[in-house]
Amino acid sequence: MNDITATATARDSRTLGPDAPEFDDLLARLTLEEKVRLLTGRDFWSTWPIEKIGLRAMVVSDGPSGVRGEVWDERSPSLNLPSATALSASWDPQVAARYGAASAVEARRKGVDVVLGPTINLHRSPLGGRHFEAFSEDPVLTAQLAAAYVDGVQRNGVGATPKHYVANDFETERFTADVRVSGRALREVYLRAFEDAVTEAHAWVVMSAYNSINGATASENELLETPLNSEWGFDGVVISDWTAVRSIESAKHAQDLAMPGPVGAWGDALVDAVRRGDVDESAIDRKVRRILLLAARVGALEGFEPVAPMPLEVDDGVAFAREAEVEGAVLVENDGILPLPAPKRIAVIGHNARNARTQGGGSATVLPEKVVSPLEGIAAAYPAAQITYSIGAIVQEGLAELERESMRNPVTGGPGARVEFLDAAGRVIFAEDRFASGLVYFGGDAPISRMSSLVLETDYEPSETGAVRLGFASVGAGRIMLDGELLGELSPTEPGDDVAGAFLDPPSASLPVEFEAGRPRRIRVEFTPRRLGGGLGNAFSITVGTEPAGTDAEALIAAAAAAAADADVAVVVVGTNSGVESEGFDRADLALPGRQDDLVRAVAQANPRTIVIVNSGSPVLLPWRAQVAAVMLTWFGGQEYGTAIGALLSGESEPGGRLPTTWPARLEDVPVIAVTPAGGVLAYDEGIHIGYRAWLRAGSRPAYPFGYGLGYTRWEIRDVSTGGFRGEHATVDVTVVNTGDRAGKHVVQVYAERADSRVDRPVRWLVGFAVVRAEAGSSAHAAIRVSRRDLAYWEDGWIEEPGEYRLRIGSSVLDLPADVTVTV
């Protein structure tokens, strides 16, 4: 860089705020045009550099369950961690901190300065399409895990981005919906995790949401100033969700950075607005100062010492992915079959046993180098067992990519496919060799804006003989050639108004074809895209793949049942698919897709020693749960999913999770369910009563309550006491005894009750928790801190209601055998 003289000692970014005089000189050297330019991204994933002040570009990237980097490309693989619901089911801030640290190490490996996570919106409704990406239905659990995650990221010198600020707990009409929510519910419920992420962990970045809150879109909302800046002391950058900045009006608010770029709602129009006096230049300077401070913190600004020049905490990422899944797996049924000693014959059943979901769909997607399936993990855990596999029921909806090991590039002769971009005259303007048939261009060098059409060609050698449907998923029209002959022309159904949904989960179309195992077929797809609007004109995605042809569902179930009857134990892996849980849309119901419920019933009838592994990111209905020997909820388990499953079944590891959200027995029992706006408005009429609070208020009993989970040992709570409040906190001391025959983990939970309150209160609400571990026959001590603030309520300020509060202690919201009283 030029025109910069480094100081003898770089200024320590940890001691600076945005108003630090160190930034005065840098700001004074920038023209208005340069300052405004800094406020919109340079492209999809980076900010503008300004060489004359020593500022390099900063790179941001999705997260939150891994870090993708600037390109969405299987040639640049990423660590695939378990979903946020798996993390939150650990109930362990230490695991959350390590999860954040692992994300930061991955970010630095990929040249990323800011991770766009964690997602800390709440599980207001189980129908929320992005439920898997968020932590919990409870604000306190979410807040403590969020603060730990943010701290883990930032200790390693990378910015964390709590998102989406705020009340973005649904996907339907998410760009335009207006959430009508009371001030009390905002403060006590929806803002709580953001507050802790800022006040406890000092987040460097916060992402504003698409939706409006009480009439004002998030990027133009006073909530960006109060409470975020004025009350909590946030000194970082408010980055927009992609394309969420829509007008000059947002520049008058505490919205600092509009993404993506280079074209956005600000630019030259904002320069003109400043010169006309419509926007004060001091508002621009305030935003620039915060961007400079972020740059100093991450090491993007010369003359400033970054927070961590090198990562401070480095885990074995792959080993941690396995451990995080084990810590979050929740055992909800067990007749004693688990842990499972070495059986001679195991029937492994289920589509998801071989093709498991390790992550949810949408912008959170990363591309791991390798995924261990449950089938592989079980085989490794029981090497002496005879293992059979049956698909049982088709779960897949839409196209699955072609198997990478079955693809050969016709140009190089190596693995993969040849991809060419053509202009309007049919000339090749860009070509690349890929290893996968699912392609996403969201940043990078591919000339999306200049492309007229795309050609993908591969020699595909299927591993199985049979009829399938071959096609593509994208927005546009194309044709498929097979061995040089036209198979057909296809135009997938046009998507709705959610442009991001069309990009991340595009429509598909396919044609029937017969494949023969071991016989290569030349597949050529020629595709003409339809340009996406809404700021995604330079983005493109297409998947070439297959989907099942007409299958005999009854025959599949019968074959699985026969395999189960012939085995010592049956392990059925059921779950969701990308058409059920993904960014861009909400769920229509909570039923498992396909014939999976019928499959479980048939297998359980054939063999009562049936264990069911549930591979979903959020609640599903389990109507057969009383008919099987064991049920384990394992979420989207990350790339080491199968290894963790093998360890959990064999007893090498204990399922350490407790439910971070209530699992219903029936959809009609769910007290807060609506995710669809009416007339553009989504009313949060339930106020502070979401999740288990709403269940308690309604008097309904779910299948499995908040906080619930079994392990492989037993626990007793003894000797509960408290010294009451001393200052802002009271400590509840608990002795927990492991009365079982093996070491284990327990989560002690503390809930408050105030039956005679003068205001509407939940029946009870979580105020603290602690993870304890002990050997068989040993005890552990938990000291759980309870804050006065968590007993207060919001009424134009935090109000403490004097009197006695009953604190109940136990292992779930419905299992609370001990209690103490504290007085405010």
Image: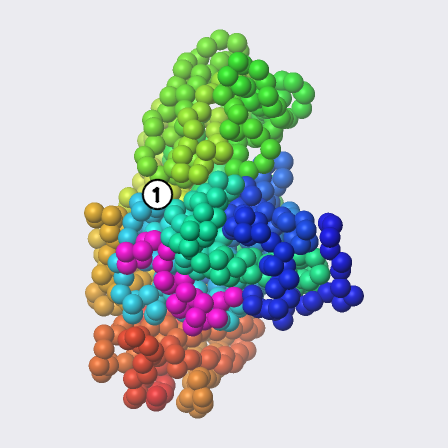
> How many numbered marks have been drawn onto this rendered protein structure?
1
Residue 554 shown left or right of residue 75 in the figure? left
**Image location (x, y in percent) of residue 396:** 41, 34
Residue 100 shown left or right of residue 685 in the figure? right
Q: What residue span does the magenta drawing correspond to?
A: 212-235
Q: Is residue 224 magenta?
A: yes
Location of residue 375 with respect to 521 vertically, above or below: below
Location of residue 126 with respect to 94 vertically, above or below: above
- Residue 811 occupies which quadrant of the picture? bottom left
Q: Which residue is mark 1?
A: 585
Q: Is residue 340 visible?
A: no
**Image location (x, y in percent) of residue 797:** 33, 77
Residue 292 shown left or right of residue 390 in the figure? right
Front residue of this view, candidates 59 and 728: 59
Give the amino acid type for the residue marked by disc 1 in the picture. Phe
Front residue of this view, candidates 340 and 402: 402
Q: Tell me what residue is drawn at x 60 percent, y 59 percent.
A: 27
Location of residue 345 with respect to 663 vertically, above or below: above
- Residue 123 occupies which quadrant of the picture? bottom left
Q: Is residue 319 magenta?
A: no
**Image location (x, y in percent) of residue 472:** 44, 25
Front residue of this view, candidates 680 and 372: 680
Task: Locate the C terminus and report the quarter of the image it occupies.
Answer: bottom left
User: Helix or strand or loop: what does disc 1 sit on?
Assistant: loop
